[in-house]
Image (cartoon, rainbow, N blue to C red):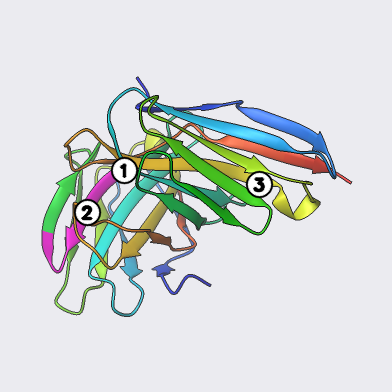
Amino acid sequence: SQELEQSPQSLIVQEGKNLTINCTSSKTLYGLYWYKQKYGEGLIFLMMLQKGGEEKSHEKITAKLDEKKQQSSLHITASQPSHAGIYLCGAAVSTGNQFYFGTGTSLTVIP
Amino acid sequence: DSGVTQTPKHLITATGQRVTLRCSPRSGDLSVYWYQQSLDQGLQFLIQYYNGEERAKGNILERFSAQQFPDLHSELNLSSLELGDSALYFCASSVGQVGHRGEQYFGPGTRLTVT
């Protein structure tokens, strides 16, 4: 079973449209991280959320953490082709020392 | 460029063989993490070292082992290779240790193909 589930699995949007990706944990979260990956390349750190209710923005990407729901969302405003890639959430869950990544969301932005 | 380097970039080897993957963390980072990424399993955490000591273990097979050296570079050894070990292997580094993990910076990965 996956500790972190992401939805949707894939997303195809027209350039300029807004979109949201969700990440849900089956266990208590201890910090939530968002990464972006170009196919076959390393992950690029986007944002880290540590407290319930926390919201962070970087350029046109905003991430929120809902600690009660054990859920985080990543919202992209006015998407551009440069936003295309695979978005992964990552977290340490429960009190274990392991770090888990979500199943990933593949984003395609059509010019 | 994340500052994390991994060698080699590509590796093709036969079943039953042994390979070593190498990782140099960002300057100043004491933690090194190893991950395996495959199409069917996604990105799986293997193991973490902090300042030379093992700190966390994930889904790492007994045929796999790792170590972190005094200069903080790390090696991941994969032995008795099977076809299913074909994957992208990533190394990441961070300043902190378990509990103060902070963001991890990923290397470009080593693509291992077992034939």
Quick check: do tags 2 and 1 share a chain? yes
The residue carrying mark 2 is B48
Q: Position of residue B49 (x, y in %)?
A: 18, 59
Residue contact at pointers 2 and 1, CB within 8 angstroms: yes
Of residues B9 and B81, the one drawn nearer to the viewer in this rendering: B9
Considering depth in this image, is A54 or A71 the residue closer to the camera?
A: A54
Question: Which image quadrant is residue A108 in?
Answer: top right
Which is more toward the observer, B64 or A15?
A15
Classified by dominant secondary structure, the portion drawn in magenta counts as strand
Q: CA distance from mark 2 to mark 1?
A: 8 Å
For badge 2, the amino acid type reads Gln
**Please, what is the three-letter code of the amino acid marked with disc 3?**
Gly
* Residue A64 location (% of width, % of height): 50, 41
Q: Tag 3's secondary structure?
A: strand
**What residue sits 20% from the left and 79% below the top?**
B71
Q: Is residue B86 visible?
A: no
Q: Chain of mark 3?
A: A
Q: Which residues are magenta?
A: B45-53
Residue A85, disc: 3
In three-dimensional space, the C-alpha distance between marks 1 and 3, rounded to whole angstroms, equals: 21 Å
- Residues at marks 3 and 2, CA–CA distance in whole angstroms: 26 Å
Q: Residue at x 16, y 39 (%)?
A: B62
Q: Answer left or right for A70 relative to A36.
A: left
What amino acid is at disc 1? Phe
Q: Secondary structure at mark 2?
A: strand
Q: Which residue is mark 1?
A: B45
